[in-house]
Image (cartoon, grey):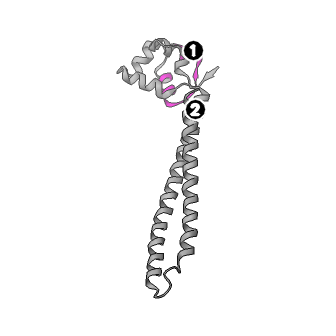
Amino acid sequence: MQFQADTNKIKRWREERHWSQEHLADLAGIGLRTVQRIERGDKASGESLKALAAAFNVDVMALTLDAKTEAEALVRQKQAKVTAGMRLAFFIHLGSYLFGMLLFAGISLGIGGDHYVMLWPTIWWTVGFAGHALTVAIVELTYRYEREVGMGK
């Protein structure tokens, strides 16, 4: 049976101990090419993982990837991308809103008699901007809550 090894952990542990791949292969009693394949991300046999676990003096499960943990990490990455995109869109909207408000103020001040000519566009754009800000805040708070509750499991 083939297992998905935690290649980052195996490589990190090997490097922390200042072991070469050849040294790890000798300690584990497996071939150098096997160590290279595992560190490259190929699937590993149960025997190879047991041998590596013995070399590192850990339980074999410490060297395998947990599908649930990997799925949670992917979800967190996707959420981070979504929130980063939402923040960028919000700041673009903020910049255009500030420019628009300056433009509306200039138009209102430049017209001789009616200083409130741009009042309704200002109000509606402000309502739209506030809605955008509220949406970003709700998404940020929701993701933050999910992270905190997820950590408490």
Residue 47 x/y as whole percent: 57, 14
The answer to if 72 sits in the magenta stretch is: no
Residue 37 x/y as whole percent: 51, 27
Residue 73 x/y as whole percent: 55, 35
Going from N to C along the chain, the mark reached first, 2 or 1, is 1
The answer to if 48 sits in the magenta stretch is: yes
Of residues 115 and 15, which is closer to you in this image?
A: 115
Disc 2 residue type?
Val
- Quadrant of res 105: bottom left
Q: Is residue 132 left or right of residue 101?
A: right
Mark 1 neighbour density, 10 Å: few (under 14) some (14–19) many (20 or more): some
Residue 9 x/y as whole percent: 47, 25
- Quadrant of res 3: top right
Residue lying at 39% horizontally and 17% vertically, measured from the top left: 23
Residue lying at 48% horizontally and 87% vertically, measured from the top left: 113
Looking at the rendered structure, which numbered label has been put on residue 105? none
Residue lying at 51% horizontally and 22% vertically, measured from the top left: 34
On the question of residue 77 being in view, the answer is: yes
- Residue range corresponding to the magenta coloring: 34-50
Q: Which residue is mark 1?
A: 47
Picture layout, residue 138 above or below residue 31: below
